[in-house]
Structures are given as structure tokens and as C-alpha cells.
Amino acid sequence: MKILLIAFIYNELPYLGDFVTYYKNQGIDLYIIDNYSNDGSYEWLISNNIKCSRFDTEESFDLRLLQKELTRILHIKKPDWIVYTGADLYYVFDKTIREEITTASNKGYNQLNIACYGALNTGEKFGTPLYNHYFYGKYWKEIVMISKYHEDIVMNGDNIIIPDSKIYNSNGIMCNYGACKPIAEQKIKLKRRQKAWDNGLNQNTGRHFRNGKTVNWTWKKEEIENFHRCINAKYFKKLYSEN
């Protein structure tokens, strides 16, 4: 079974080593779409033999265009299953991703949902891997970003839609560490997303970038959740203890 992790990135050089190592250990293939990084990310991918290509959105973080390109690549690669993620998003299961998908597939399911959390910066000293330095955040919602490939696949924000969906309620979590990156990086992301909004992207897409600005991308611990004590604490502990 061919399982393809696919992601788009922009200026993720400090995080790529941890990201690639983690997902290679999950028994799946990787394909990265570089959104014309200027920090050496694309060159790093090439030098480390990571399958990749480049796609230009003229310095805007336009999810519509990026997901359209991602879908185009999927129609070329035609994997059996897709794992849609980003360089700061980590899936954690009791088993490997390949084993979790195999279990779902053998039971006749064609998609997986998973509990999604967002880790937040609470004033910690910046460090990588991100999952070893940031342990506070918020539960967001259940998402479907792992799916069997279908010719009529549709990317809709944080969900993959296919005909005749049969969703497996997986154990585990997906944690987004994007909000833990340095403030200078957050300002660049907001500027790029603002350009996409100006070009017609739905204003609600990525509104968390605006929310982060209101607190200067630093949250109070007492107002959010301690991952060590949350309902899915074992998965967070597994993430940073095994990698």
C-alpha cells in the first residue's frame, strides 16, 4: 500500500530535519511543495533527496491556490492513501501512521478523523523540535486530513472530501505547533495571509493569525490547556519521549 504524506511549506528550514525524520519513521513516503521559500528550505529538500517541487503564489499564503496545486500533484502520484500535513503538524497514534491506516483500510474505511490540537507559545524559550518545548494549547476540533485517494478528491480547508466517505474514528491526535514559532515568523505569515485575503481568500480562512496578533503571539498558561493533563496526554508524551 502506497501512503503519501504531502505538505506545502514556506521558510521552514529550522523545522525540516525533525519533520522529515519523524515522518520517515512512520513508514510512509513524503512529497513537499515548496511555496518559493527564500531561507534555503528548497535547497535542503533537494540535498536530502526529498521528493519535492516548487509553486509560486507571489508571496501570498493563499490556501486556495496551494491546495489546488496539492490536488494536482495527487492526481499525478495517485497514492493509495494521503496524509495531508505541514512542517509543524504532527500526527501521533499508538502505532505508526502506516499501521493505523492499515487497520482502518482492512475494516473497510476510506478516511480517518483525528482530534486536532493547537499548541501555543506561552513565553517559553524558543527551541526545536517544537514538540519538545511547547506543552500548552487548545483542543480545536475533529478533522479529516488522512484519506484514501479518489479522482474526485476535494480539499476543503482542514478536511479532505471524497465520494462515499466512510470515516474511521481513530485514536491519537494531530498537534499544530505553528503558533509556537518566533514572533518575527508570525508577522511574516500574517502579512502573506493578508495578501491572500486581499486577493479574495475567505477572511475566515486563517483568522487565527489575526487572533495571535492581538496577544503578540504569546498566550497566558492559565487561560489554555496543559497537554500533560489533558484527555489525550499520553499521545503528547509519546511524541516528545520517542523522538
Image: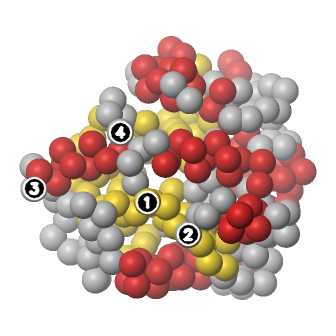
Report the residue marked by disc 4.
96
Quarter of the figure with residue 181 = top right
Q: Amino acid at mark 1?
A: Asp
Q: Secondary structure at mark 4?
A: loop
Residue 236 percent across, percent down from the top left: 50, 26
Within 10 angstroms of label 1, few (less than 14), some, or many (20 or more) residues? some
Residue type at the position of mark 2: Lys
Please give left or right for residue 193 compared with residue 191 in the image.
left
Q: Residue at x 39, y 78 (%)?
A: 77
Task: Tell me if residue 217 can be seen.
Answer: yes
Which percent across, then down, holds residue 180?
Answer: 73, 39
Query: Residue 32, located in which quarter of the rendered image?
Result: bottom right
Residue 52, position in %: x, y? 59, 72
| Residue on which disc 3 sits | 108
Q: Looking at the image, what colour scheme do you see?
A: secondary structure
Q: In this figure, which residue is indicated by the disc labeled 2?
A: 51
Q: Earlier in the sequence, mark 4 or mark 1?
A: 1
Mark 4, mark 3: which one is toward the viewer? 4
Q: What is the CA distance from the residue labelled 4 to the residue labelled 1? A: 13 Å
